[in-house]
């Protein structure tokens, strides 16, 4: 019988893959994308009412972050943005986005929103 954290069984490698993806998101993004992410996370943490709305707040924050970074990347494209083709290009890019990265973004957003919401509840009592 294999242990829950059996390295040979692959369980630990899944967790390590997610961890490396989360670290890559935080360390590999440029400062503007991190600032966009921080603003969205702070707004989401202040908008949800307790931890019962954490899932909805996380999904909404991920959608807003995706839209904001798409607009940012289109606005900073050299030679001008192709605004008419942007939705189709983003939809196609989403299909090739790694699931591990998507889960890592979800975990990162949920944890940060949860922590910020907890701090908000302590400060604004």
Image (cartoon, rainbow, N blue to C red):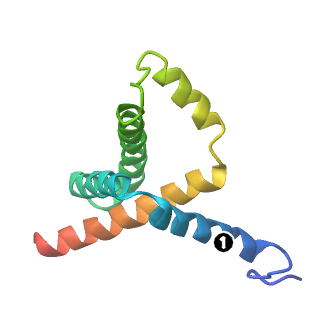
Question: The C terminus lies in which quarter of the figure?
Answer: bottom left
Q: Is residue 79 above or below residue 27?
A: above
Does residue 73 appear left or right of residue 13 in this picture? Answer: left
Does residue 55 appear left or right of residue 99 in this picture? Answer: left
Q: Is residue 97 above or below residue 101?
A: above
Q: Residue at x 74, y 82 (%)?
A: 5
The single residue placed furthest to the right in the displayed view is 1
Does residue 74 appear left or right of residue 47 in this picture? Answer: right
The single residue placed furthest to the left in the displayed view is 125
- Element type at mark 1: helix
Q: Residue at x 49, y 55 (%)?
A: 106
12 or 101, which lies in front? 101
Q: Residue at x 37, y 52 (%)?
A: 33
The single residue placed furthest to the top in the displayed view is 84
* Residue marked by disc 1: 15
Image x and y of residue 72, in percent? 36, 38
85 or 57, which lies in front? 85
Does residue 110 appear left or right of residue 38 in this picture? Answer: right
Q: Residues within 10 Å of mark 1 (few under 14, many from 20)?
A: few
Image x and y of residue 70, in percent? 42, 36
Question: The N terminus lies in which quarter of the figure?
Answer: bottom right
Would you identify the image quadrant in which residue 20 lies? Answer: bottom right
The single residue placed furthest to the front in the displayed view is 79
Q: Is residue 100 above or below residue 87?
A: below
Q: Is residue 113 above or below residue 63?
A: below
Q: Residue at x 80, y 84 (%)?
A: 3
């Amino acid at each position: 019988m294999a242990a829950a954290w059996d390295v040979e069984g692959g369980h630990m490698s899944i967790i390590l893959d997610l961890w490396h993806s989360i670290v890559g998101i935080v360390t590999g993004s440029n400062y503007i994308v991190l600032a966009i992410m921080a603003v969205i996370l702070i707004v989401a943490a202040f908008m949800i009412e307790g931890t019962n709305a954490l899932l909805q707040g996380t999904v909404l924050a991920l959608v807003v972050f995706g839209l904001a970074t798409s607009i940012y990347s289109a606005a900073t494209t050299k030679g001008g943005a192709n605004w008419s083709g942007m939705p189709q290009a983003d939809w196609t890019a989403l299909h090739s986005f790694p699931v591990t990265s998507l889960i890592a973004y979800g975990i990162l957003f949920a944890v940060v929103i949860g922590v910020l919401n907890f701090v908000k509840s302590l400060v604004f009592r």
